Image: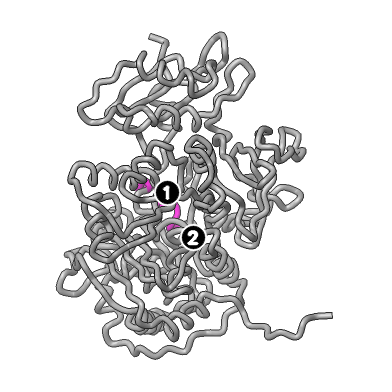
Amino acid sequence: MHGLMMDVPLTITSIMRHADLVHGDSEIVSVTADDPHHRYSYNEAFGRVRQLANALANQGLAAGDRIATLAWNDYRHFELYYAVSCGGQVCHTVNPRLFPEQIAYILNHAEDRWVFVDPMFVPLMEQLQSRLPLVKGFVVLTSEELMPSTDLRNCCAYESFIADQSDSFKWPELDENAASSLCYTSGTTGNPKGVLYSHRSTVLHSLVGALPDVMNLSVDDVVMPIVPMFHVNAWGTAYSGPMIGAKLVLPGPKMADGETLARLINAEKVNYSLGVPTIWLALVNYLEQSGESVDSLNTVVVGGSACPLSLMHALEKHGVWADVGWGMTEMSPLGSYNRQSAALRDSTQAEIDQIRVKAGRSVFGVEMKIVDNDDRSLPRDGLSSGLLKVRGPWVCSNYFRGDQSTALDADGWFDTGDMATIDRRGMLTITDRVKDVIKSGGEWISSIDVENAAMAHPDVREAAVIGIADEKWTERPLLIVIPEDRATPESATILAFLEDKIAKWWVPDACVFVDQIPHTATGKISKKDLRKQFKDFGHG
């Protein structure tokens, strides 16, 4: 027997219609190359979305055609999110920080028909266009007046592209399982792989992301997603924000500029923001150097890589609490969330610190388990460490244009590639990436735990730990440190600092100081590049 409920599809179009009708006065403020402070309402945004949908319809695009963007977090990119997906095409957000060869591979693999590109990336597209035979044309995200001179084929300015179009559009009735957007992994091993999201998965992900025990979003919030719209849908905020009517503040190309972020936070009264640890380091450094404050900002969520406890404490000095989120491109990306809770209020500082660095509890809709090398489930005791597997309605079942075996195991679980523990309350702790974990004398060392301990030293700005070949122990950890400005720490001092904070045999044999640590295109420390850089360390 089936229930007697309406069979209304879960689509991004329904988010758009709701935001337009119910939250039309809420604002979107953004920084662009041609306007440092653009402001308009959801009503105005979706009027332009309908103009863009008409312009796209005139290009003869078929349902499911891919349309690429190389763009920052701004209002034109927001318009593309909705016009493309709700029009029946697939919005393919491309990370412009990838190597040119990877970008060319991604655009060709996705078979993109049009590319919408920020003026900053026009030279990159000019360099690549001869290698993109399937791309019919390019649209530069600017006005005709500020359109750069370019030899891109079939190219025009965004404002001209939509200028003469009607702001009325009849949206197609879409299957909720139709593809809506596409994002490629960063390709740390082999070619990048495409993750193809559906309307249904996106709506469910957005609903859960806004829940009280997750991001806790409401119409009263002013949300600044610093996580890029070119990677995993800005962690869903481009959908969950309009769903609940929050004001959105989009920092454009200034997402790593501490001064601009502080200005936007103060001018727009931002109270919630999302970013990777390097973003919050930049903000904290600016606040400490300038003496400015960010009084409205009370919560940030840190994801993408482990958040050092020292960074959490630094943010607290400025009145900001750091939540931790964990997920993956293949998970849309939300998997777990660790939010400040009432249960911590009566805890000691040491107990609070121990809990808050964890990845949190799995959110509703995501199942998790850890398994050993023989794929046997391990207990949720907070001690047993194993490979983390997940499943759920917004978890990838297969990579785009790949075969079924590429994503799931025989029982339908996705292998995250993370090593983790889960305790009896469901609290997840990521101990390392499988490819980054260090095996010394037959025992595992968590590079994440060693890095976090090192970051607590006042003279350490950033730290990374990799495994170095060792004749006796197979591998030993090497600590790589960027010192704080004007600090001149000694290697022995840093290593001695670790001795009562981690297992004695986890303490690295050496500490080296560098001016910079390589990061991936999504802001994570690139252990692959560090291993290459230090492959001969200790061998003369």
Q: Residue under circle 1?
A: 322
Asked which quadrant contains residue 397, the reply is bottom right
Above or below: residue 331 compared with residue 267: above
Where the C terminus falls, by quadrant? top left
Q: Residue at left 15%, top 73%?
A: 145
Stretch of the chain drawn in magenta: 98-108
Number of residue marks: 2
Rendered location of residue 13, percent (x, y): 50, 79
Which kind of residue does numbered mark 2 sit on?
Met
Check the picture and name the quadrant holding the N terminus.
Answer: bottom right
Residue at the location (42% across, 37% down)? 308
Residue 235 percent location from the top left of the image: 46, 58
Whether residue 328 is visible: no
Looking at the rendered structure, the secondary structure element under dot 2 is loop
Looking at the image, the residue that sits furthest to the front is 346
Residue highlighted by disc 2: 215
x and y, in percent, of residue 234 in the image: 43, 59
Q: Please state which of residues 111 and 523 is positioned toward the viewer in this rendering.
A: 523
Residue 31 vs 62, above or below: the answer is above
344 versus 495 height, above or below? below
- How busy is the neighbourhood of tag 1: few (under 14 within 10 Å), some, or many (20 plus)? many
- Residue type indicated by callout 1: Ala
Is residue 423 within the magenta segment? no
User: In this rendering, would 449 be left or right of 258?
Assistant: right
Q: CA distance from mark 2 to mark 1?
A: 12 Å
Residue 312 makes an appearance in the image: yes
Q: Position of residue 163 (x, y in %)?
A: 26, 83
